[in-house]
Amino acid sequence: MQDWQDVPEGHTLHKAVLKQTPLLVGAQIRASSPQQRFPASTRLDRARISAIDAFGKHLFYRFDKRGRTAWLHVHLGLAGRFDFFRKQPPPAPRPSVRLRMAGPVHTVDLRGPLICEVVDQARREALIDRLGPDPIRPRSRATRFAARLARTRIPIGAMLLDQSVIAGVGNVYRAELLYLARIDPRRASNAISRAEVATIWQLARRLMRAGVLDGRILTTKYGDLAPLHAGQRTYAYKQHRCARCGGPIDHAKLAGRPCYYCPRCQT
């Protein structure tokens, strides 16, 4: 099978919140753009970070300065990542650093994000309102998710990548959720039963929250089957054989990405 590269999924951003909150929240930040591609960093310089939150694949940092609030909005995209430093002064930034956030003790560098922008409260709320429910967030419910599926014949494998339908699910979790639920990714969304929708949602909550704790996608540890071989981290995604029937894993291109599935078990 062809090797495909995928965007970080929702667990990566929620893990970033857990890691960065004790390092940055409450600290006055020296913000700079070593790459000089983010001039808005001057608006954040010498401001205090009071909160960091994640919605799906989006990160929001609240900066407070002289009674005014601004939000840093980050989407990692395909190549974005964070680097962390404790020593002071931190090392010279790499050429790819879009934003450096240096506190009194810790420094966080953001490299190669798809989106790095300063937004106001109204813009932040508008961005969040466009997202579907995030299975990782504790108060999130499946009601909107189920309603969107019931109104369309678009294949379920495509709908799971639509961030306005369900936030945070990417190509890996999509394949794993449908494999464990035994649902063919090509099936029309409005043909998915209520029980199956509930199963997808509960699997998403369980597997993606586990991904936050593990810091990686590891569905075989939390799925309903034993791994096919030692060290196997997924059941269907980029696998060759099905853990249930032993048949070959295939893939269908849905929403521009390959969705891996078992033709025998996911009927």
Image (cartoon, rainbow, N blue to C red):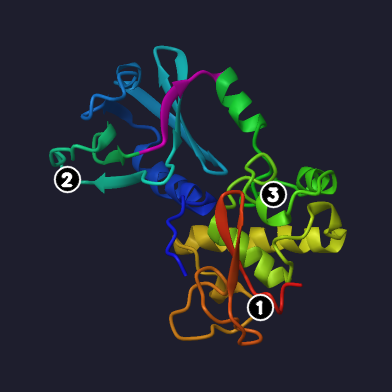
Report helix, strand or loop for mark 1: loop
Q: Which mark is residue 87?
A: 2
Number of dots carrying numbers: 3
Q: Residues within 10 Å of mark 2 (few under 14, many from 20)?
A: few
Report helix, strand or loop for mark 3: helix
Report helix, strand or loop for mark 2: loop
In this view of the protein, which residue sits in the foreground, 229 or 126? 229
Q: Is residue 106 left or right of residue 25?
A: left
Residue 243 vs 4, above or below: the answer is: below
Instruction: Name which residue type carries label 3.
Output: Met
Residue 104 vs 1, above or below: the answer is: above
User: How far from the left and from the top, in percent, is residue 261?
Assistant: 63, 70
User: How far from the left and from the top, in percent, is residue 123?
Assistant: 56, 21
Question: Which stretch is magenta?
Answer: 113-121
Q: Which mark is residue 159?
A: 3
The residue lying at 39 percent from left, 44 percent from top is 20
Query: Which of label 1 and label 3 is nearer to you?
Result: 3
User: How far from the left and from the top, in percent, is residue 1?
Assistant: 47, 70
Q: Residues within 10 Å of mark 3 (few under 14, many from 20)?
A: many
- In space, the residues marked 2 and 1 are separated at their CA atoms by 44 Å
The answer to whether residue 231 is magenta is no
Q: Which mark is residue 56?
A: none
Q: Earlier in the sequence, mark 2 or mark 3?
A: 2
In this view of the protein, which residue sits in the foreground, 221 or 113? 113
Instruction: Name which residue type carries label 1.
Output: Asp
- Location of mark 1 (residue): 224
